[in-house]
Image: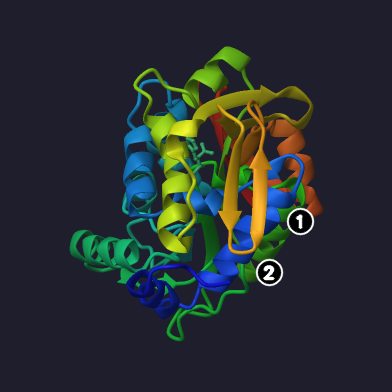
């Protein structure tokens, strides 16, 4: 299937992802409920909007996790020791990882992993500048696929996988177990992991965190359609969708939806998708855990909980895992 404008076509085919992207969007839209992979939320504009979300009063996630890291970094360092290489999933440069690095002055190496080369390069520059004695070894990769660490990554050192931000919650239970299992393999028998997870709490607090008063999250969600339009030459009419965030109790997750405000037809090459008024496309799932059910999930991937670090209201947790 080929997009219409030649100039845009050339641009799209250069990155080689056009056919794959189109197949991904079409497959998702043929499901009931219709869905769009959460990865479409993150083009450059989406990433900037997400940074804004992290500063919103309603979105407690980033603030609480930073606070937990700052409060408990010394205790974490005491459990871990600094004969350690830290491998961060999603490149860091945030106050969260810095709190840990500051508490581990003898730390050997830091390996930030990110699929976005530009933000990885930014992180690498900033970390090399601020931690001159630390070996910073960036790895540009998709952490949901098998990883090959940089050649000069020290072998003999214990490995700590750091996966903050409650990003694990954006994966299904099966995907989360698979991801934790691949971390377990990468960390090795004496390795450890620190995972940031968002905890189950009142529906109102959760729904507000994903549907803020300023409408930044709504714009972030709608931007997924703009991204698809731009990359794949599809004609989603943004004005015919509205953002919705819903707590789904049985699955213990927030779902972000784009609800169709009209009967509409979307053409994608030969395929024609008819959306009814009120029908929705699910764009993201954000699973919330209890410390108990997260321990079960981690155990299924070969991990054992060594410590839980929580804020006072028990809204967020940073969990230290060791090999089971
Ligand atoms: C990236 N991820 C952990 C965020 C979350 O809370 O699940 C994404 C997000 N979506 C809407 N607001 C934030």
The residue located at (31%, 50%) in the rendering is 102
Kindly state the secondary structure of the residue where label 2 is placed: helix
* Element class at badge 1: loop
Please, which residue is most extreme toward the left here?
129
Query: Could you tell me residue 199's position as x and y percent?
Result: 61, 28
The quadrant of the image that shows the C terminus is bottom right
Q: Label 1 belongs to which residue?
A: 301
Instruction: Note whether 311 is above or below 283 in the view shown.
Output: above
Q: Quadrant of residue 57?
A: top left
Q: Picture quarter containing residue 247?
A: top right
Q: Position of residue 207 (x, y in %)?
A: 55, 20
Along the viewing direction, whichever of 257 and 251 lies nearer the viewer: 257
Q: Is residue 110 left or right of residue 31?
A: left
The residue at 77%/42% (across/down) is 32
Label 1 lies in ligand 1 vicinity (Cβ under 8 Å):
no
Q: Residue at x 48, y 62 (%)?
A: 232
Residue 190 in sight from this viewpoint: no
- Disc sitting over residue 76 in the figure: none
Q: Which residue is mark 2?
A: 185
Colour logic: rainbow
Q: Residue at x 41, y 73 (%)?
A: 9
The span from disc 1 to disc 2 (Cα, nearest Å) is 10 Å
Q: Residue 152, image x and y in percent?
A: 42, 84
* Number of residues whose C-alpha sits closer than 10 Å to that of mark 2, classed few (under 14), some (14–19) or many (20 or more): some
């Amino acid at each position: 299937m080929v997009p219409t404008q030649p100039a845009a076509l050339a641009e799209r085919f250069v990155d080689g992802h056009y056919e794959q992207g189109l197949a991904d969007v079409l497959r998702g839209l043929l499901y009931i409920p219709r869905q769009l992979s959460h990865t479409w939320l993150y083009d450059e504009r989406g990433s900037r909007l997400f940074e804004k979300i992290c500063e919103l009063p309603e979105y407690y996630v980033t603030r609480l996790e930073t606070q937990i890291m700052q409060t408990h970094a010394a205790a974490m360092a005491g459990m871990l020791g600094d004969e350690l290489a830290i491998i961060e999933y999603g490149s860091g440069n945030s106050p969260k990882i810095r709190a840990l690095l500051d508490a581990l002055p003898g730390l050997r190496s830091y390996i930030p992993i990110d699929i976005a080369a530009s933000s990885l390069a930014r992180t690498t520059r900033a970390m090399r500048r601020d931690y001159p004695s630390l070996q910073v070894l960036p790895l540009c990769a998709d952490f949901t696929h098998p990883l090959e660490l940089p050649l000069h990554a020290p072998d003999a050192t214990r490995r700590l996988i750091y996966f903050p931000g409650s990003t694990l919650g954006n994966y299904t239970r099966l995907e989360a177990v698979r991801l934790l299992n691949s971390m377990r393999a990468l960390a090795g028998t004496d390795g450890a992991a620190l995972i940031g997870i968002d905890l189950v709490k009142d529906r109102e607090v959760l729904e507000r965190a994903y549907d803020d008063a300023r409408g930044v999250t709504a714009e972030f969600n709608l931007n997924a359609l703009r991204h698809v339009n731009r990359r794949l030459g599809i004609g989603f009419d943004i004005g015919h969708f509205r953002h919705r965030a819903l707590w789904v109790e049985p699955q213990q997750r927030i779902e972000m939806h784009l609800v169709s405000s009209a009967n509409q037809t979307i053409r994608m090459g030969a395929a024609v998708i008819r959306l009814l008024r009120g029908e929705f496309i699910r764009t993201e799932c954000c699973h919330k855990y209890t410390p108990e059910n997260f321990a079960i999930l981690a155990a299924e991937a070969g991990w054992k909980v060594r410590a839980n670090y929580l804020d006072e209201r028990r809204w967020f947790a940073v969990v230290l895992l060791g090999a089971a």
